[in-house]
Amino acid sequence: MPPIRFDGQLISIRLMVRRTEDTVWRGRMLFGAPDTEEERSTAEIFCATSEPDLWQSVRDLRDHHLRDLYRSLL
């Protein structure tokens, strides 16, 4: 995903996706550099019955939503 700008810095964004035993797709947002103390993660806030549906819900987010999610993790 493209990074967001927050307080003048670019923050990288990744999505961690998994498929549960009941075949539901779940995902969480990861903000910041991987495997560092600065990395922040949401709970599994994305849920869908198919992988394309999950990705569509992520694509529907706007920059201000992503900045608010990141701000909530600080």
Image (cartoon, helix red, strand yellow):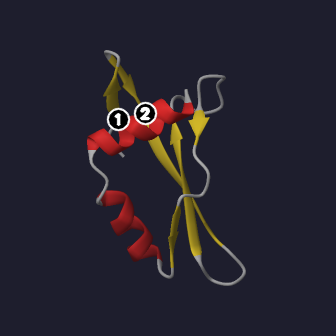
For badge 2, the amino acid type reads Ser
Please report the residue visible at 55 percent of the width from the left and 26 percent of the height from the top.
74
Please give the count of numbered marks on the rendered protein: 2
When the figure is inspected, residue 45 is found, relative to residue 69, above or below; the finding is: below
Point out residue 52 in the picture as x, y percentages from the top left corner.
Answer: 39, 75
Answer whether labels 2 and 1 touch (C-beta < 8 Å): yes
Percent of width and height locating residue 21 = 72, 80
Relative image position of residue 40 (x, y in whole percent)? 58, 34
Where in the figure is residue 1, as x and y percent of width and height? 36, 46
Q: Residue furthest right?
A: 21
Disc 1 marks a residue whose amino acid type is Pro
Identify whether 1 is placed above or below 4: below
In the rendered view, tell whether residue 26 sits above or below residue 6. below
User: Is the residue marked by circle 2 packed among few (<14), some (14-19), or many (20+) residues within 10 Å?
Assistant: some
The CA span between labels 2 and 1 is 4 Å
Q: Which mark is residue 12?
A: 2
